C-alpha cells in the first residue's frame, strides 16, 4: 500500500494530510514553516511537531511515503524552497513536489481542468488554467508588493483608513478595537507599534476590521469593500487572459474569502458586472485536497 502526504504551508499555520490510495488517515495542524515568516528554528520545531503527531496517530513511518506535495506562497524564493526541500528530504521518503499555494487550491477546485481560483488568507493570489494545462497567475507578490484582499492588506489598510479618519474628524470604532486587539493603551502607543521594525502582524487586524464593519462602522466596511474590488481586478486580469470560449468556473480558497463576507460580496459583485457569464462556486475549497491529488498523481 502506498502513502501520500499533502501539505498546505501558509503564513500563520501549516496543515498536513496523510492518506493512502483511497482514504485520509490523519490531518494535523502546526505553526508556519514558511521561512519568510518564521526563523529556521521555529519552522523546524513546528514541522517536527507535526511529523511526530502524524506518525503517532497513524503508526506510519514517514520514510515510507511514496510522494509528497507541498503548496506554499513564495515557492520560487530560494529561502522558502531550499529550506522546505531540505527539511522534508531529511525525514520524508519518496518524491517531493513543491507548488504555489494557489496552484494546489486550483487543483482542489478543478483537478487538472480549466478554471479560475481566487485565494485570500494571510496573503493572496489568483490563478487560472487553460484547457491544455498551462497556468497563469496575477498577484501573489507578497505583503510589500501586493497581496490585495489578504489579511495582511486588510490590517494595514484598516490602520491607514483609521488615521485618515482621525485627520478628517470622521467617526470610527477602529481605534478602540485595534487598541484592544493589540493590547495598547493609547494612540501614541499604536503609532509606535505599527511603525516598529520588525513590523507587527497586520493580518491580526482583519478580524478586528470585520467586527467593526459588522457593527456598522463605515470606515471599516469601506476597507473591506475596496479590498474585495482590488482582488476582483486581479481575477479579471486572469479571466481576460484565458480568453475562454465557454463560461469559466471560478472558485475561492482561504480564510478571508470564507469569513469576510463584505469583501467576498464586493469581489463577486465586481466580477459579475464585468463577466456576467462567470460560474461562481459556493463556499471555499480545501487546498489540501488539491495537494493530495497532486501527490497521488505524481507517483502514478
Image (cartoon, rainbow, N blue to C red):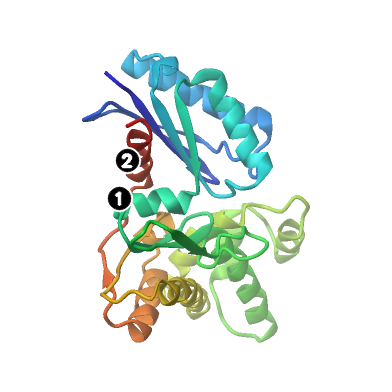
Residue depicted at x 35% and y 15%: 60
Query: What x and y, as percent, mark residue 258?
Result: 35, 58
Query: How many C-alpha atoms fall within 10 Å of the one at disc 2: few (<14), some, or many (≥20)?
Result: some
Label ID, residue 111: 1
Label 1 sits on a secondary structure element that is loop
Question: Which residue appears at 27% of the width and 26% of the height?
Answer: 20
Displayed quadrant of residue 187: bottom right
Lateral position of residue 146 relative to residue 128, left or right: right
Tell me the quarter of the picture where residue 271 sits. bottom left
State yes or no: discs 2 and 1 in contact (Cβ < 8 Å).
yes
Q: Which residue is under mark 2?
A: 293
Q: CA distance from mark 2 to mark 1?
A: 7 Å
Between 141 and 137, the one nearer to me in the picture = 137
Residue 175: x %, y % from top left: 60, 68
Mark 2: which secondary structure? Answer: helix
Q: Position of residue 290 (x, y in %)?
A: 35, 45
Q: Residue furthest left?
A: 22
Q: Residues within 10 Å of mark 1 (few under 14, many from 20)?
A: some
Q: Is residue 248 visible?
A: yes
Quadrant that contains the C terminus: top left
Q: Residue at x 44, y 72 (%)?
A: 213
Above/below status of 260 relative to 85: below
Quick one: label 2 or label 1, which is nearer the N terminus?
Answer: 1
Badge number at residue 166: none
What residue is shown at x 33% (from left), y 48% (from top)?
286
Residue 153, above or below 8:
below
Asked whether 247 or 213 is in front, the reply is: 247
Q: Is residue 299 left or right of residue 219?
A: left
Q: Is residue 9 visible?
A: no
Q: Quadrant of residue 267?
A: bottom left
Amino acid at each position: 500500500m502506498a502513502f501520500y502526504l499533502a501539505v498546505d504551508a501558509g503564513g500563520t499555520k501549516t496543515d498536513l494530510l496523510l492518506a493512502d490510495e483511497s482514504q485520509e488517515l490523519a490531518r494535523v495542524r502546526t505553526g508556519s514553516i514558511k521561512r519568510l515568516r518564521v526563523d529556521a528554528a521555529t519552522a523546524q520545531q513546528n514541522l517536527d511537531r507535526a511529523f511526530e503527531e502524524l506518525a503517532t496517530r497513524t503508526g506510519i513511518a514517514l520514510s515510507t511515503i511514496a510522494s509528497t506535495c507541498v503548496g506554499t506562497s513564495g515557492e520560487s524564493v530560494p529561502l522558502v524552497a531550499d529550506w522546505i526541500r531540505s527539511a522534508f528530504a531529511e525525514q520524508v521518503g519518496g518524491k517531493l513536489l513543491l507548488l504555489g499555494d494557489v496552484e494546489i487550491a486550483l487543483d482542489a477546485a478543478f483537478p487538472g481542468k480549466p478554471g479560475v481560483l481566487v485565494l485570500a488568507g494571510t496573503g493572496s493570489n489568483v490563478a487560472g488554467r487553460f484547457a491544455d494545462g498551462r497556468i497563469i497567475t496575477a498577484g501573489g507578490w507578497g505583503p510589500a508588493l501586493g497581496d490585495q484582499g489578504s489579511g495582511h492588506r486588510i490590517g494595514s489598510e484598516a490602520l491607514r483608513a483609521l488615521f485618515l479618519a482621525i485627520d478628517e474628524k470622521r467617526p470610527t470604532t477602529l481605534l478602540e478595537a485595534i487598541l484592544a486587539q493589540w493590547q495598547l493603551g493609547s494612540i501614541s502607543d499604536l503609532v509606535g507599534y505599527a511603525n516598529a521594525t520588525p513590523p507587527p502582524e497586520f493580518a491580526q487586524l482583519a478580524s478586528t476590521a470585520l467586527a467593526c464593519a459588522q457593527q456598522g462602522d463605515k470606515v471599516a466596511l469601506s476597507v473591506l469593500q475596496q479590498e474585495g474590488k482590488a482582488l476582483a481586478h486581479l481575477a479579471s486580469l486572469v479571466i481576460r487572459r484565458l480568453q475562454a470560449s465557454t463560461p469559466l468556473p471560478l472558485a475561492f480558497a482561504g480564510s478571508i474569502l470564507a469569513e469576510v463576507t463584505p469583501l467576498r460580496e464586493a469581489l463577486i459583485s465586481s466580477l459579475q458586472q464585468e463577466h456576467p457569464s462567470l460560474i461562481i462556486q459556493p463556499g471555499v475549497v480545501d487546498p489540501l485536497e488539491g495537494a493530495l491529488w497532486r501527490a497521488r498523481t505524481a507517483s502514478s
